[in-house]
Image: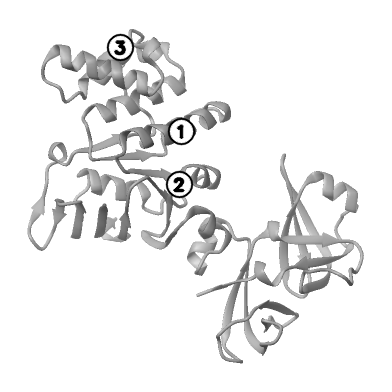
Amino acid sequence: MLNVAIKKQFASNGRAGFALSADFTARQGITVLFGASGSGKTTTLRSIAGMVTPDAGRISLGDAVYFDSAARVDLAMQKRRVGFVFQDYLLFPHLTAAENVAYGAKARHEHARQQQVSELLELVGVDYAADRRPTELSGGEQQRVALARALASEPAILLLDEPLSAVDVATRSRLLDEIVEVQRKTGIPFLYVTHSPADAVRIGDSLLVMSEGSIVQQGKPLEVFNAPLNVPAARVVGTENILVGRIAGHQPDEGISVVDLGACRIVILRSQLAEGSRVTLGIRAEDIIISRERISRTSARNLLAGTVRHLLRDEESVEVVADCGVDLKVRITPQAERALELAPGVEIFLLIKASSCHILS
């Protein structure tokens, strides 16, 4: 089990700049460190590996203490048994795939080293490319070799810093499955950095959400994405609608509470907050349904009348911004946009389940 509780202050032009304050535990399997660029993910990995020295705190993996400011422990990088897979691979261009892996091999005797290299290349599925140099390998093949090289040192933990950012979508999909399989076969914990929600959900056993240098939530990936617990986490995982209001009342028999947003009211699942309490709600854009007609018989407890303010389109979806007294973002398919004949000024109704409205602390 990896335990991290560190602080690091960076200076900028003589003044205090970015501050890292990371406190978390990562167990077996694949722990995903998720957040926007500049949130501190890479700095956290580099601190664990020994490339960055924290100002204070402690880093330990099982019984091994990597860093402890109080005990004045700062284990050298080469003694930490940490494997690191970088975003840009960092393979030696003049060495073959096998020679790159052998460079990191722990085995001292030549025969044992060759055996280890062969097994690792086979494990990551590039044994056929053992004699090729990096320039003769595709991006996906280079990444597999980099993974094998990191494993060659027989690490106690493997750190992966956005390792698939430079490969195409199809290759990325295959490599994600292979990384999961490699982790299962080796049994060592992986700490995987990404800013891709799809990647996080696909491979993560646990998710750490990072914002402005701090861990703001930890849990199962789908649970965190579907129901963030606080505003910073909601913003990081992409909850598009964050609304502030007050508890207007409770209906215990119905299992619901009513939130007054000022210009409209919205029903949520029963809250323990007292009437009049200030509350912040998060609603994902894809959890809202649009109708051109008022629907009277529906399981959704909220039916809000509004108008289309504007539409934002990309190749896969359409974001509808609706004015219902408060602005709400709704994500639909291009086919749904055409079927509903949406355009700015069109009157619509939004259907929202009470269970889709999450209280953010």
Q: Position of residue 35 (x, y in %)?
A: 45, 52
Q: Amino acid at mark 1?
A: Leu
Q: Secondary structure at mark 1?
A: loop
Residue under numbered circle 2: 204
How far apart marks 3 and 1 lie (CA) works out to: 21 Å
How far is disc 2 from disc 3 in space, using C-alphas? 32 Å
Residue 21, can we see it? no
Above or below residue 39? Residue 141 is: above
Frontmost of labels 2 and 3 is: 2
- Residue denoted by label 3: 96
Q: Position of residue 73 (x, y in %)?
A: 9, 53
Mark 3: amino acid: Thr
Amino acid type at circle 2 is Gly
Q: Are marks 3 and 1 in contact (CB under 8 Å)?
A: no
User: Which residue is the site of mark 1?
Assistant: 164
In primary-sequence order, the first of circles 3 and 1 is 3
Q: Nearer the viewer, residue 12 or 69?
A: 69
Q: Earlier in the sequence, mark 2 or mark 3?
A: 3
Helix, strand or loop status at disc 2 = loop
Q: Residue at x 69, y 56 (%)?
A: 286
Q: Secondary structure at mark 3?
A: loop
Q: Say if mark 1 contacts mark 2, CB within 8 Å.
A: no
* Outermost top residue: 131
